Every structure is written in C-alpha cells, then in structure tokens.
Image: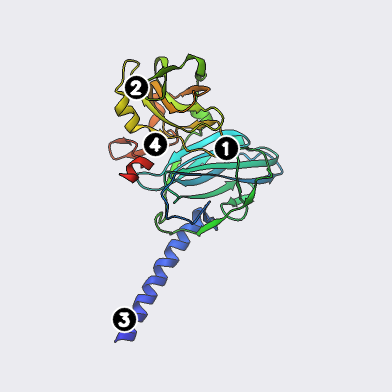
C-alpha cells in the first residue's frame, strides 16, 4: 500500500513538473532566472545591468519581447528605453512587440534590474518573426555589466554570477503573461518637460524641489550628479507638500555605477518632484503619457476595477 502511495505521489509530481515545463517551453524556452549575487543575508538595495547582443540579417517585421524583472526593470534596445515594469503585486511576464526597435546587423539588448533587497532576478526571452522563438534568452548569452553603458561590449563585462534556474522557481513560480500594446517609446507622444538642476529649489531636510508648469501625467526621469545617492518623491499638486510625509514615502533611486539617469517605471500625475540627495540633481524630466493609455502603459498592473495602485517595498520598510 505504501509503495502504491509513493508511486502515486511520484507520478503526480512528475505530471505537475511536465505541465510547468510545457508551459515554460511554450513561452520562454530555456530562459533562466539570472541575478547578480547569492549572498542574501544582509539587507541592502541591489541593481544590475545585463547585456547581450543579437545579429539579424534583416530588420524583422515583428518581434516579441517577454520579460519579468524582480522588483523593477528597464529594457534598452539599441540604446532606446523600450519597456519598463515592476513586479508587485503578482509577478507578470510582460509582452511587447519590439520589432521596430531592432535593426539589420548587431542589436544590443540591455536590461536594468533593481531590487530593494539582495534578492532579485531577470527572466527574458525574445521571439523574432522569420528567425524563430526564443532566439535570445536570459542565461549564458548575457553578461553582467558592472558599470552603466549600453554598448555591445565593455571591459567590465563578466559572466552572469547566478542562475536561479528556469520557472517554476520560488518566489516567482511562473509569471502570468500580460501583453502591452505599446512600448515605452511608442506610448510617449509629446516632447519631454525638462527642468534643469539650476531651477530646483533647495528645501529643508536635504531636498530639492522641482515644480512643473502644470500637473502632467507621465514617466519621471531624474538625472543625478556623479556618485550622488538619492531618494525621489512626487506630488500630483504644484502647491506645498508635507516634507516629512514625502520623505517617508520616497523611493530609493537604486542605480548601477556610472548611471546618471533613473526612470520611475510607473507613469503618474506629477506636479512637483522632490529629490532627497547630498548633491543637487542635474535635472528632472517628465515624459507625458495620455491618461487614456495609462491602463496599458508599461509598468502598470490591470486590476479587477482598473489599474492596481503601486505598492513597493523599500529598504526603510524592511528595517522597521
């Protein structure tokens, strides 16, 4: 009887594994979760830049990028910011048609991944029409770049230090596919609103305030000074804000060495930006997005009754 039960459990487990493997093979092939470290004891914010290249004989009519990054990611294709997202609540495999950003010859795929803890991961696969499915996947094809540059190669490139394995893998299990009809460059249809660092107003508490001419819905870029750490908070209004509350809610701008421009992966209504930093930033920039497109913008999660509000872990909340 015991042998029968053991056999049933084995067969059941084998069947579940076959199911997950089949699901994985259909969408991401041999793509593995990759990361920068497996030293997880000490809580600290982490960021990584993974870079690979793909040679194409012609520009493809379409190509599907499939990506999940824990906890935030920004994908650059041939130097252009193409996609961004965040992994809470629920892990998603974001799907984008990126054919228009690929070209004949050598293409560079770079993915910035951030986490408020040392735990993180990137899962990525790329289908190219006329070439095949999963022609580029996260794994040995990627290098970990130790400074921020988007070229084909860099002297700081090293082999990816950690491969967590293919899905399902705790804590990600298998991300649920979520198609996005627009890439980041397509959804931004107006010129950016830029405020230079000299126009920022210093305020108490080591912050600089940048006020927009009018509240604008869009993506926020902050351009930091060399080597300066910082945290960022926004308000949808242009009037006074509670600085204590803003500081408590501020997001750490985790970056790779040499990276100046930091993107908040969720579009939001922005009337003013508060940057908490030891040095004044070089500027802030808002890329406007039409609000009717916000529910399908890269970085948002569609909920049961509309887009799910952002919910981030921070190094501060983890210490408390």
Please tell me which residue is depicted at 46% across the width and 50% down the height of the picture.
120
Separation of disc 4 and disc 1 at Cα? 18 Å
Q: Which mark is residue 105?
A: none
Q: Which residue is mark 2?
A: 236
Please tell me which residue is depicted at 31% across the width and 81% down the height of the picture.
5
Q: Position of residue 254 (x, y in %)?
A: 47, 38
> Closer to us: mark 3 or mark 2?
2
Mark 4 and mark 3 residues within 8 Å of each other at the beta carbon: no
Comparing 277 with 254, the one in front is 277
- For marks 1 and 3, the one nearer the N-term is 3
Mark 1 and mark 3 residues within 8 Å of each other at the beta carbon: no
Q: Is residue 122 visible?
A: yes
Q: Position of residue 273 (x, y in %)?
A: 41, 23
Q: Position of residue 30 (x, y in %)?
A: 55, 58
Please tell me which residue is depicted at 34% across the width and 22% down the height of the picture.
236
Comparing 134 with 255, the one in front is 255
- For marks 4 and 2, the one nearer the N-term is 2
Q: Identify the secondary structure beneath mark 3.
A: helix
Q: Position of residue 105 (x, y in %)?
A: 71, 41
> Closer to us: mark 4 or mark 2?
2
Q: Which mark is residue 76?
A: 1
Q: Which residue is mark 4?
A: 300
For disc 4, the neighbor class at 10 Å (few under 14, some 14 to 19, many from 20) is many
Q: Identify the secondary structure beneath mark 2.
A: loop
Separation of disc 4 and disc 3 at Cα? 45 Å
Q: Quadrant of the N terminus?
A: bottom left
Comparing 66 with 282, the one in front is 282
Q: Which residue is mark 3?
A: 5
């Amino acid at each position: 009887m015991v042998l029968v039960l053991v056999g049933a459990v084995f067969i059941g487990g084998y069947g579940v594994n076959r199911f997950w493997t089949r699901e994985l093979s259909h969408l991401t092939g041999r793509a593995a979760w990759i990361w920068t470290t497996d030293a997880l004891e000490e809580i600290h914010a982490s960021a990584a830049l993974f870079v690979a290249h793909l040679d194409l004989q012609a520009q493809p009519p379409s190509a599907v990028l499939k990506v999940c990054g824990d906890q935030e990611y920004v994908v650059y294709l041939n130097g252009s910011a193409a996609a961004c997202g965040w992994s809470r609540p629920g892990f998603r495999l974001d799907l984008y048609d990126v054919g228009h950003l690929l070209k004949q010859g050598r293409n560079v795929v770079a993915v910035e991944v951030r986490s408020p803890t040392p735990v993180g991961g990137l899962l990525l696969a790329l289908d190219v029409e006329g070439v095949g499915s999963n022609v580029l996947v996260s794994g040995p094809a990627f290098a970990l770049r130790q400074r921020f540059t988007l070229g084909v190669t860099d002297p700081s490139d090293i082999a990816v230090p950690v491969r967590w394995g293919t899905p399902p893998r705790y804590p990600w299990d298998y991300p649920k596919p979520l198609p996005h009809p627009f890439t980041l460059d397509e959804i931004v249809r107006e010129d950016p609103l830029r405020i230079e660092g000299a126009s920022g107003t210093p305020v108490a508490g080591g912050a600089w305030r940048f006020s927009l001419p009018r509240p604008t819905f869009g993506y926020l870029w902050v351009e930091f000074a060399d080597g300066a750490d910082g945290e960022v908070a926004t308000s949808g209004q242009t009037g006074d804000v509670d600085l204590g509350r803003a500081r408590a809610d501020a997001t750490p701008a985790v970056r790779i060495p040499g990276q100046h421009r930091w993107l908040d992966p969720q579009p939001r209504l922005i009337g003013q930006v508060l940057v908490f930093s030891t040095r004044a930033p070089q500027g802030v920039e808002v890329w406007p997005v039409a609000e009717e497109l916000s529910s399908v913008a890269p970085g948002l999660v569609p909920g049961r009754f509309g887009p799910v509000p952002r919910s981030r872990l921070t190094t501060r909340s983890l210490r408390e």
